[in-house]
Image: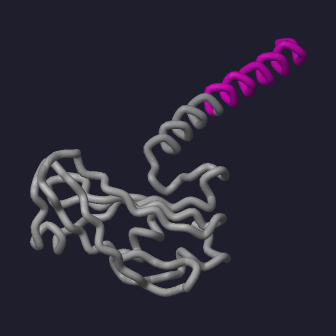
Amino acid sequence: MDYYEFFFTLIVSIFVVLTVMTLIWHISHSKAVKSSRCYKPATYKDKLTLVSKDKYENKMYKIKYDLKKRNVNINCACKEGNVMNKFNVKYFDINKYKDSSRDLACACSEKFDYIDELNTYYYGTPGLVNYMETNDISVFDPAYEE
């Protein structure tokens, strides 16, 4: 057997194996990035979002924090309708660095009662979900990194 032929076969085999491994890694990485709620691109680094839902997955309200502009937007997220609902929304006042709450009136397609307010589930940025459930304000710390 010729040494050049053996060397060439070895190099081509290594190249093919590395190419296949790279393709498999790239496919699994892109699927993980798309399905992960923890991954956020650098453009969203200073923006936190949270959606509150009841136990039937009906959206109630949405909170958006912009840490760079230091403001909070609280909006209704329920389907529009004729039923008036009033939510007592807990949020963190970034400028005063303290917990606050605000009453939010929404015209929704269904009635949310006090039981739904007690059984509220939060979806969004993990640090913000942790704040809503445990009052841990470390997500608003300038050195916070997820």
- Where in the figure is residue 79, as x and y percent of width and height? 22, 46
- 2 magenta-colored: yes
Quadrant in which residue 7 is drawn: top right
Q: Nearer the viewer, residue 21 or 125?
A: 125
Q: Residue at x 14, y 54 (%)?
A: 56
- Where in the figure is residue 98, as x and y percent of width and height? 49, 87
Q: Nearer the viewer, residue 85 or 57?
A: 85
Q: Residue at x 25, y 63 (%)?
A: 105
> In which quadrant is the C terminus drawn?
bottom right
- Where in the figure is residue 106, as x and y percent of width and height? 24, 58
> In which quadrant is the N terminus drawn?
top right
The answer to whether residue 46 is above or below residue 92 is above
Q: Which residues are magenta?
A: 1-21
- 103 magenta-colored: no
Numbered label tally: 0
As drawn, the residue found furthest toward the right would be: 4
The answer to whether residue 98 is above or below residue 10 is below
